[in-house]
Amino acid sequence: YVSPAFSRKMKKLKQQEKKELDDAVLEILSDPSIGQEKAGDLAGVFVHKFKINKQLTLLSYSFDESEISLLTYGSHENSYRDLKNYKKA
């Protein structure tokens, strides 16, 4: 499952950036527990850190035994604030 916020941001990426994002998604698909689980308001959300154009990018997702939900991604700067806003909506 891909959230609407995730797909909107993905459309704005250049070809090389999409490839780096796809590689990170494949890493998550091979081992969903690769990310770091968050606590508090973001309980149940995992964050995988990777680089796009030498900039640290956080990819947030949740998973259960049947599916992985890609929530959002972005730079560390406002990533957690945006994720909290997304979860509230």
Image (tube, helix red, strand yellow):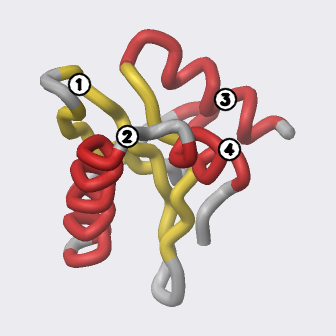
**Upstream in the sequence, badge 4 or badge 3?**
4
Q: Which sits in the foreground, 38 or 2?
A: 2
Image location (x, y in percent) of residue 63 = 49, 69
Relative height, residue 88 to residue 43 (above, below): above
Q: Are marks 2 and 4 in contact (CB under 8 Å)?
A: no
Tell me the CA gap for discs 1 and 3. 19 Å
Q: From this viewpoint, which residue is outermost toward the left? A: 54
Instruction: Find disc 2 in the rendering and name its residue.
Output: 14
- Residue 36 seen: no
* SS class, disc 3: helix
Of the two numbered discs 1 and 3 in the rendering, the one whose residue sits closer to the viewer: 1
| Rendered-image quadrant of the C terminus | top right
* SS class, disc 4: helix
Q: From this viewpoint, which residue is outermost toward the right? A: 89
Q: Are marks 2 and 1 in contact (CB under 8 Å)?
A: no
Instruction: Find disc 4 in the rendering and name its residue.
Output: 5
Instruction: Find disc 3 in the rendering and name its residue.
Output: 84
Q: From this viewpoint, which residue is outermost toward the bottom? A: 66
Tell me the CA gap for discs 2 and 1. 16 Å
Q: Amino acid at mark 4?
A: Ala
**Upstream in the sequence, badge 2 or badge 3?**
2
Q: Are marks 4 and 3 in contact (CB under 8 Å)?
A: no
**Upstream in the sequence, badge 1 or badge 3?**
1
**Upstream in the sequence, badge 4 or badge 1?**
4
Residue 41, image quadrant: top right
Q: Residue at x 57, y 39 (%)?
A: 9
Relative height, residue 1 to residue 55 (above, below): below
Instruction: Find disc 1 in the rendering and name its residue.
Output: 56
Q: Is residue 23 left or right of residue 82?
A: left
Tell me the CA gap for discs 4 and 1. 19 Å
* SS class, disc 1: strand
